[in-house]
Image: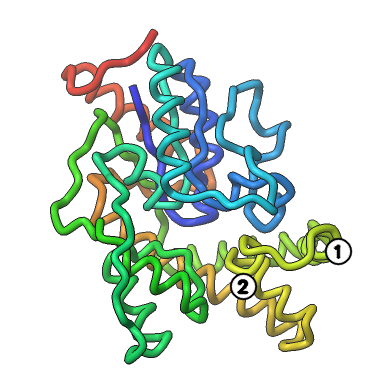
Amino acid sequence: MIICIVGPTGVGKTRLSVMLAKYYKGIVVNADATQIYRELNIGSAKIKDEEKEGIEHLLFDIKGVEEEYSVADYQKDLRKILKDYQDKNIILTGGTGLYIKAGLYDYSFSPMKKQDYSCYSNLELYQMCLKYDANLKIDQNNRRRLENYLNRTNKEIIPPKPLYDVIYIGLTTDRDHLYNLINQRVDKMFDDGLLEEVKLLLKKYGKLNILNRAIGYKELIAYLNGLITLDEAKELIKKNTRHYAKRQYTWFNNQLNVKWFNTNFTDFSLTFNEVINYIDKLLDNKEFSKKE
């Protein structure tokens, strides 16, 4: 059985993934592009070792920040896990929709076909890319990557077909509450040492692509380069995270068959029970098969 947990930051995906893995005696697999990298801990809200509760977690911390890692790499790595652990119940969790789609669907990567985009502004190129992937993680000012993305010929003109039977679970909350959660989470990241994490990474590695495109890191690099104040950087992280959450909802609703559950932050066990009742009903109806 494959269960995929999606949703924006702060709604309880990590907590639910561990609870489901314990309940169904499974493993947890990462589907977040930033949590792939070692040393990107605070800004990525990566699960801590003590939070794993003895559950095996895969595809976390598998690359150094100086290494490049593509959607095609993730597709290969995820499918190997799905093959190697086919006797296990797998809980896939994260907010990077393109990773999920590439790994679980018949999603192919074609060679690039060079086209001339010189007549378009960076903003126009960015908006064109968003039509294909609302969950896009390319900086609006990175013209080379935007053009490379558009030059790829696999724009899902023919929708890819699912390769696996997957139960898609989404966690959500109302917009005002979500935005408040995001703001609080960013404040806590600063309390936990996000700025110090970024300073250490810059001192150790210098300029890196992942740091210049990941929310929480690129804004602080702008601050450290003297382009904005620290308060402006903090507010920009909150703003960019809110916008990213909005794009995530749009992408998941358009691309995946997600069953959404409102997170009960007062008593999370109620949310957990709702989710397992839904899953167990699917299993009872033999729509999916559970690994023992």
Q: Quadrant of the C terminus?
A: top left
Task: Identify which residue, 110 or 252, lies in the foreground.
Answer: 110
Q: Quadrant of residue 221?
A: bottom right
Q: Secondary structure at mark 1?
A: helix
* Mark earlier in primary sequence (2, 1): 1
User: Closer to the camera, 78 or 173?
Assistant: 78
Under mark 1, the amino acid is Lys
The residue nearer to you, when weighing 260 against 201, is 201
Give the residue at mark 1: 203
Identify which residue is drawn at 43% across, 26% down: 80
Residue 161 location in percent, x, y?
18, 40
Q: CA distance from mark 2 to mark 1?
A: 21 Å
Where is residue 286 drawn, in percent x and y? 18, 17
Depicted 24 relative to depicted 72: above or below: above
User: Would you say 243 lies left or right of 225 here?
Assistant: left
Measured as percent of width and height from the top left, residue 69 is found at 54, 49
